[in-house]
Image: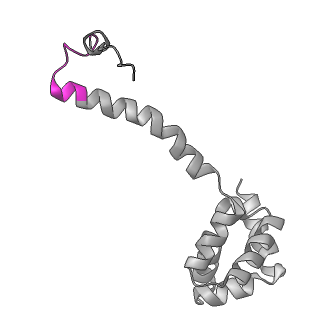
């Protein structure tokens, strides 16, 4: 097995004048540069699978979650988060989350919600 040449001294040249604290700060800055685009993607993108998963964790069956997700996709509401839509509807209507989700399977409610969300964009 070929041994890698030791070039540590050469590679650390631009860092050797930094204190431990300065190296920590630089490390955090570089880490942010890597992680920030990933966080941005997580905040701005979702998938039907993720939204179904959220709904199932809220207590809906996989079949109910699939129906809700598909209907929300039809009304272009998925980008707002399926769980968020159900939660907000339950609070606005003063009903349980489960009741809200089951009611939202009726598209007349989704149509009204879609109007409100799309007006504010």
Q: In this picture, which residue range is highlighted in magenta?
A: 13-23
The answer to which of 91 and 39 lies nearer the viewer is: 39
Which residue is at a point 29% across and 14% down the rendered structure image?
Answer: 6
In the displayed structure image, the side of residue 93 where residue 70 appears, left or right: right
Looking at the image, what colour scheme do you see?
A: one colour
Asked whether residue 108 is drawn in magenta, I would say: no
- From where the camera sits, is residue 114 visible? yes
Q: Quadrant of residue 48?
A: bottom right
Rendered residue at 31%/12% (across/down): 7
Q: Position of residue 71 (x, y in %)?
A: 80, 73
Residue 105, located in which quarter of the rendered image?
bottom right
Spot occupied by residue 120 in the image (x, y as percentages of width and height): 70, 57
Compared with 42, 88 (above or below) is below
Q: Report the label total.
A: 0
53 left or right of 69? left
Which one is nearer the viewer's eye here, 29 or 89? Answer: 29
> Vertical placement of 99 versus 70: above or below?
below
Relative image position of residue 109 (x, y in whole percent): 78, 80
Q: Position of residue 42 (x, y in %)?
A: 57, 51
Q: Main secondary structure of the magenta part?
A: loop
């Amino acid at each position: 097995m070929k041994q890698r040449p030791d070039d540590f001294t050469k590679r650390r040249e631009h860092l050797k004048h930094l204190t431990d604290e300065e190296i920590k700060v630089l490390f955090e800055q570089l880490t942010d540069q890597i992680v920030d685009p990933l966080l941005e993607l997580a905040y701005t993108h979702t998938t039907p699978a993720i939204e179904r998963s959220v709904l199932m964790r809220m207590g809906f069956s996989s079949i109910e979650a699939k129906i809700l997700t598909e209907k929300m996709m039809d009304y272009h509401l998925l980008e707002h988060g399926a769980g968020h839509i159900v939660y907000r509807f339950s609070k606005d209507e003063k009903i349980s989350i489960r009741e809200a989700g089951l009611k939202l399977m009726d598209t007349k409610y989704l149509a009204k919600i879609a109007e409100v969300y799309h007006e504010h964009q």
